[in-house]
Image: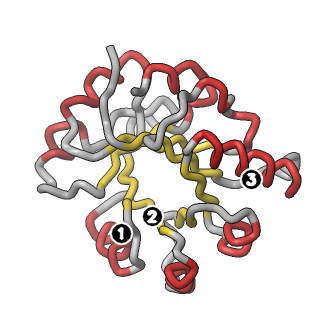
Amino acid sequence: MFAFKKKYFLIIQNIKDINLNNIKKSNKFVIILRNPESSDTIDSLIKFRKKCKIKGIEFYVANNTNLAVLLKSDGVYISAFYKGFEQLNLRKLNKKIIGSAHNFQEINEKRKQGCSYIILSKLFRVDYAPLENFYGIVKFNLMGNQKNLIPLGGIKLINLNKAKLIKSEGIAIMSEVKKKPAISNRLF
């Protein structure tokens, strides 16, 4: 089964985590580069950014506005722990801001920071922390008509079909992108 959403947020640790050839040309995909590794040189990041632009894929850099401007990215992704407002200067450069949150207080902080999308974690139980709380589909949907909230956490090939039930414009996937790169083929 396929998950039909307006946006698919793929969070990667380095540019080798994803093969852009697996993604059909579409304006639905957003790639967020989180914690770029030292193996990702500026030149390789610039080439990757150009490939994203050619394919119509939005590209964001996490927590580094200088790198975001240097790579001419579509904007910046700010983690939940980031409480500052310096990134609002990016709005003058016509850049978007995506934020991350884990609870209502952080959601409100991200709104004040001017985030166009807020990635809310955790939707499902995750393998790396099986005892930690998660929202689930019902609780996530009860948060109200908050289309800019994007669920993250525990979304895998085996439960991808459940993403249809989520009242959100999109979904975010992190670990499954690296484990099973073909997941991007199943997202239309």
In terms of image quadrants, where is residue 114? bottom left
Labels 3 & 1 near each other (Cβ < 8 A): no
59 to the left or right of 125? right
Q: Earlier in the sequence, mark 3 or mark 2?
A: 3
84 to the left or right of 149? right
Circle 1 SS class: helix
Question: Which mark identifies residue 36?
Answer: 3
Q: Earlier in the sequence, mark 2 or mark 1?
A: 2
Circle 2 SS class: strand
Q: Position of residue 162 (x, y in %)?
A: 26, 25
Q: Which residue is mark 1?
A: 106
Is residue 133 visible in the rendered structure shown here? no
Give the distance between the C-alpha atoms of the residues marked 2 and 1, in whole angstroms.
9 Å
Q: Which amino acid, by three-letter code, is at mark 3? A: Pro
**Dot 3: within a 10 Å radius of its alpha carbon, few (fewer than 14), some, or many (20 or more) residues?**
some
Q: Position of residue 95 (x, y in %)?
A: 53, 71
Q: Earlier in the sequence, mark 3 or mark 1?
A: 3
Question: Which mark identifies residue 99?
Answer: 2
Is 79 drawn above or below residue 58 in the view shown?
below
Give the distance between the C-alpha atoms of the residues marked 3 and 2, in whole angstroms.
17 Å
Instruction: Depth check: give the residue in front, 178 or 18.
Output: 18
